[in-house]
């Protein structure tokens, strides 16, 4: 898939999903006005759609004439690096291993004002690399080269890389997908972030139409997608449907009772 096709805000700017991203951008704008410069995107599981959310948020911010840098911090399975065709290019891992300067890692994209730092080609252990003091220096230098830095991380349930990175971030956005919702895992991730003093600005719901029901097409019928955003003290899960309606042979699933309340419980709220 090309970056343009993944970016609903560019390929389908009048769709409800694009409008939902613009609503999310408004929330992020408030954070930027309060001094936030770097935002880390985390999720519990692979397949939650975190990389797609991160890309679309970046694209919406460039529409405000902000210079944005995407950083692929998943040194094991680099989604953004593959998406932008930079698999063989030096990147974050090469900086952390002391091989290159940051100026050599900022690659332009087809989207004006958007650049990307790929995961890189270093053969050293990702866990060792992200634990080095060079990571703090990378974040410090990157701040001087753009208006906003967005960091795409590996799933927290798979490794602790995001926790090592998070201490250098201004804030964090947690992506949750109802299709993969566990409950205990998401709460453990939230508590891990808290115990490492990593600030979390809110939860982004990915893959829901914002109601107590959601459908997923199978086979040739595709999917319904939606995005919603919620922050502490606010309602969580205002999403919009997008795509094909489920057909007769589709699988229709329903979140277990009280799903939205349990998402809210990530902030200590009750149903």
Image: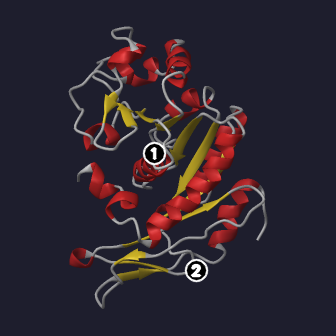
Point out residue 132 in the picture as x, y percentages from the top left corner. Answer: 51, 14
Query: Is the Cβ of the residue at disc 2 closer than 8 Å to that at disc 1?
Result: no
Q: Is residue 39 above or below residue 2?
A: above
- Per the image, the residue denoted by label 1 is 62
Point out residue 34 in the picture as x, y percentages from the top left corner. Answer: 72, 39
Point out residue 58 in the picture as x, y percentages from the top left corner. Answer: 46, 46
Q: For residue 225, which quarter of the picture?
A: bottom left
Q: Nearer the viewer, mark 2 or mark 1?
A: 1
Left or right: where 221 falls relative to 232: left
Q: For residue 107, which quarter of the picture?
A: top left
- Per the image, the residue denoted by label 2 is 212
Q: Which type of secondary structure does the marked residue at label 1 adopt? A: helix
Left or right: where 182 falls relative to 89: right
Disc count in the image?
Answer: 2
Q: Which type of secondary structure does the marked residue at label 2 adopt? A: loop
Between the residue at mark 2 and the residue at mark 1, the CA separation in whole angstroms equals 33 Å
Q: Is residue 216 visible?
A: yes
Q: Is residue 267 above or below residue 109?
A: below
Residue at the image position 37 percent from the left and 17 percent from the top: 103
The mark that comes first in sequence, 2 or 1, is 1
Residue at the image position 27 percent from the left and 40 percent from the top: 84
Q: Is residue 18 above or below residue 146?
A: below
Q: For residue 39, which quarter of the picture?
A: top right
The quadrant of the picture occupied by the C terminus is bottom right
Closer-to-camera residue (233/58)? 58
Residue at the image position 57 percent from the left and 57 percent from the top: 24
Classed neighbour count for the residue bearing mark 2: other residues with Cα under 10 Å, few (<14), some (14–19), many (≥20) = some
Closer-to-camera residue (199/142)? 142
């Amino acid at each position: 898939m090309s970056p343009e096709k993944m970016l609903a805000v560019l390929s389908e700017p009048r769709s409800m999903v694009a409008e939902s991203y613009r609503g999310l951008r408004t929330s992020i704008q408030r954070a930027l006005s309060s001094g936030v410069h770097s935002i880390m995107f985390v999720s519990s599981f692979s397949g939650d759609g975190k990389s797609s959310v991160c890309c679309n948020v970046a694209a919406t911010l460039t529409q405000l004439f902000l210079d944005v840098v995407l950083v692929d911090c998943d040194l094991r399975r680099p989604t953004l690096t593959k998406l932008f065709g930079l698999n063989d290019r030096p990147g974050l891992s090469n900086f952390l291993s002391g091989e290159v300067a940051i100026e050599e890692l900022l690659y332009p994209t087809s989207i004006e004002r958007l650049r990307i730092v790929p995961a890189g080609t270093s053969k050293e252990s990702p866990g060792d690399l992200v634990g080095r003091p060079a990571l703090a220096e990378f974040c410090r230098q990157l701040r001087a080269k753009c208006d906003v830095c967005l960091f795409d991380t590996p799933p927290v349930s798979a490794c602790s890389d995001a926790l090592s990175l998070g201490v250098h971030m201004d804030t964090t956005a947690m992506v949750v997908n109802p299709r993969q919702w566990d409950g205990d895992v998401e709460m453990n991730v939230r508590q891990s972030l808290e115990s490492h003093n990593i600030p979390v600005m809110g939860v982004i719901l990915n893959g829901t139409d914002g109601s107590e029901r959601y459908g997923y097409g199978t086979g040739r019928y595709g999917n319904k997608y939606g995005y919603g955003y919620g922050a502490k003290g606010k309602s969580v899960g205002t999403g919009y449907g997008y795509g094909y309606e489920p057909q007769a042979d589709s699988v229709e699933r329903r979140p277990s009772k009280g799903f939205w309340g349990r998402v809210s419980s990530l902030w200590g709220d009750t149903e």
